[in-house]
Amino acid sequence: MSLAAEAYVSQIAAADPWPENATLYQPLKDDQILLSDCASSLAVQAYLRMCRLPIRTRCRPNAEYMSPSGKVPFVHVGNQVVSELGPIVQFTKAKGHSLSEGLDEVQRAEMKAYMELVNNMLLTAELYIQWCDENTVAEITWPRYSSPYSWPLNHILAYQKQWEVKRKMAAIGWAGKSLAQVYEDVSLCCQALSQRLGTQPYFFNKQPTELDALVFGHLFTILTTQLTTSELSEKIKNYGNLLAFCRRIEHNFFEEHNREGDAGPASHFPKSPSLI
Amino acid sequence: MAAPLELYCWKGDWGLPSIDTDSLTVLAYAKFAGAPLKVHKITNPWRSPTGSLPALKTREEGSVSQPSKIIIHLRKQKYNADYDLSAKEGADTLAFISLLEEKLLPALIYTFWLDSKNYVDLTRRWHADNVPFPLNFFLPNRIHGQQLDRLRLVRGDSGLEPGDDIEKELYRDALECMTLLSQRLGSHKFFFGDSPSSLDAYVFGYLAPLVKAKLPNAKLQQHLTSLDNLRLFCSNILTLYFPSEGREPPSQKPSGQADGGDFDHEPHKRRKQLLSALLALGAMLGYAVLTGIVSIQRVQSQQAIDAPHRHRPQDEEDEE
């Protein structure tokens, strides 16, 4: 989103309250969505639930092309369209909903740093595994990504996407990494998150923040998604407090909504057999 | 442990031990950890054992190039600057390094390589002056292209034109990152107490070029100068760990400027003289060869005319 648009959005946003018909768009849940998109989408949903803002989830096969930044998920609120967690956090803040108000300067700096850690390592590792590991590409990514399209387009689009991700990996120095090294990085990242969380219920003690939403989105998705091997989820299962953290957020923000009869959004969200 | 490890890194300037972020990070870490390194400061990445800088030549694993890998290798050799950190501080280190990479690095690349004024007046000029002769014509352009590509891919934008919007976005992220770092540092001497760790090396590597370089377009610098503790942090590390570099610039600058006309351009002048002499020699030789060929061809044609006579087998037999 350009700066002018952003300034405009934050001005407009402050005026209107959060509407009842806000909608989140993501790719098709069952046949299409990939690990990294699912994680980002879940992070946004968790964030909005933590803010107690109602949101409906819609699945669209062309969500990626509907999004203003080309990345999913994006939310449609009133007459605004905002994509990705960072801008959405800004957007809700302009509307007067914020989770990180109570933090002091140092804590806010740490929160931002840990959010970048998750983006830098977990998200990149997810992208690496789904687009650069040959087995995963052949068995999962390619069929799923190209499922909505018919013959030559499915090959062209999937190839284009893979090419783009591979070039990105080369640019950030990940192209030379082996799968084992990527798992090692994930492990390192989880260790850091686990150390930081310690025995607290959330990263900054009692109140959840956008960091908690982001971490939950990624860890929960990795834990509940079946990949070619279970190695990725095994890395997380080594850290008991992270598992407990995922269960806690699921219980507090997702199951509770279910019971209230707010079943619409919750049913779009994977149940957690592997967590128990 | 007989011979010290050899490190190849970019040459220094502007009062810094190296002008490159990654090289600075590694140099600072080695100083913090007390690792005895034999440092080769070069300006030709092709001389490095891996083809890129910085590079550490190790005994067992060949050469390693990425700063994180070099630091891990030094750590394995028992040169560990993070020995005193708690597990949580180790986690914080990882998080803040990610913050630097995601938020500050793109803006740094933009400032040094894509902002046209800075690129032409400072970065390209420095490389053209310092990189050895045939490379200096295309190496800066090549790095420029690589950095542009990198920024484009990292941001996920296909149409990245150095314009106002992108600059503002990158700088906004970078300013936020520097402010966060400044808040995290507070009034401490280093990020984790009184002794420097790897995070300090990374922050120093990212910020020191911004503090010291004389950028014509200094938007990013201006913000950094307003964050006193970060500026102080960089100059502290420079005076404590690189005392020779800190003292050099004042003595270097005047001499560089005074003799700039003669000494600085002397190699270029000689190079140009040599080049023109070679060119003239080549032209003359070319002419000579050209005319020579004509004469040789004449001889050949004479031989060719002669040859048929000689070529007759009977003739040859006769001659023999």
Image (cartoon, grey):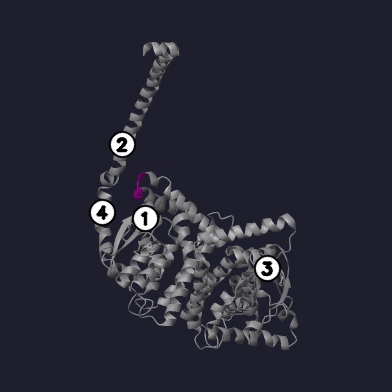
Quarter the C terminus of chain B occupies: top left
**Three-letter code, disc 3:** Val
- Between disc 4 and disc 1, the foreground one is 1
- Between disc 2 and disc 1, the foreground one is 1
In the figure, B122 relative to B295: above or below?
below
Magenta region, mostly helix, strand or loop? helix
Give residue B78's quadrant in the image: bottom left
Q: Give the secondary structure at mark 2.
A: helix
In the figure, B62 relative to B119: above or below?
below
Q: Are marks 4 and 1 on the same chain?
A: yes
The chain holding disc 3 is: A
Q: Nearer the viewer, residue B101 or B115?
A: B101
Q: Disc number at residue A235?
A: none
**Three-letter code, disc 4:** Pro
Q: Disc number at residue B48?
A: 1
Q: Nearer the viewer, residue B28 or B4?
A: B4
Give the mark nearer the N terminus: 4 vs 1.
1
* Residue range (magenta): B129-133
Tell me the residue that label 3 is attached to.
A81
Tell me the residue that label 2 is attached to.
B274
Q: Disc number at residue B254?
A: 4
Which residue is found at the position 55% from the left and 62% from the top? B155
Q: How far apart are the two marked residues, 4 and 1, measured between alpha carbons?
A: 32 Å
In the figure, B2 relative to A159: above or below?
below
Q: How far apart are the two marked residues, 3 and 4, measured between alpha carbons?
A: 57 Å
